Image: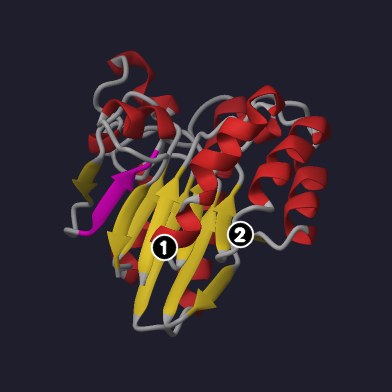
Amino acid sequence: MRLAAVADVHLKADDHEKNVRAFSIVNEMADAIVIAGDFTNHGTPEEMRGVLAVLEHIHIPIVAVLGNHDHECGHQDELAGMLRVAGVHLLDGQCFEVDGVGFAGVKGFAGGFAPYELMPFGEGGIKTFVEIAEREAIKLDYGLAQLRTPVKVAISHYAPVRETVVGEPEPIFPFLGSSRLARALDRHKPKLALHGHAHHGTFLAQTEGGLCVANVALPLLRGRGEPHPFAMFEL
């Protein structure tokens, strides 16, 4: 499979024609595309309608998760429904299979990276924060466990490893991802893990178990001089 991947597209209706030209070329380049969250800027249904006006020009399977920006206005359930009605395979603990490749995905959450990840100790707010991070990791673990395909791909918006957020200001590393996601990866050993969120991070790294992790945030891909708005992988 030729897989295209991107995250943090933050599409604007004002750029519709430019976005259609940029994204529709994926039909000729790939067999499927992953969009790892942040379709919108503020998570409004109006913004999502503009996004869908671009995505309707993509005729290969789209597999995706939501990002933090897509949650900003509290309409994430409506946005998820709009994407699914439009035919996008939006994952939130579920899995999807196409041509022998299985995808499992979640948004993920923050919390930091081992050995300095936040632990559920002290105030209730801290415990709730960590509970959300753990819940996201459990959903990813569950989705990967359901797959029986020879090749698996994991998708999250937040980073599962510290190494792919390097390039961002170090004080915000704990807010860009969580090692809890990486433990799910090392347990189920997908061929590839994709994420976004760290716009100025690092493109490729590995988990402790040696699994490939790619940060496909669009600003990062543009900084690498890609001639199109996605990274390409052969699976």
* Residue drawn where x is 53% and y is 34% of the image: 9
Q: Which label is found at residue 91?
A: 2
Q: Vertical placement of 81 versus 171: above or below?
A: below
Q: Residues within 10 Å of mark 2 (few under 14, many from 20)?
A: many
Judged left or right of residue 181, residue 88 is right
* Range of residues picked out in magenta: 211-216
Q: Position of residue 95 (x, y in %)?
A: 56, 70
Q: Which label is found at residue 114?
A: none
Nearer to me, 213 or 140: 213
Q: Residues within 10 Å of mark 1 (few under 14, many from 20)?
A: some
Disc 2 marks a residue whose amino acid type is: Leu
* Residue drawn where x is 61% and y is 38% of the image: 39
Q: Is residue 141 visible in this depiction of the protein? A: no
Q: Position of residue 181 (x, y in %)?
A: 40, 51
Of pointers 2 and 1, the one earlier in the residue sequence: 1
The residue indicated by pointer 1 is 30
Report helix, strand or loop for mark 2: loop
Q: Is residue 84 magenta?
A: no
Nearer to me, 32 or 66: 32
Report helix, strand or loop for mark 1: loop
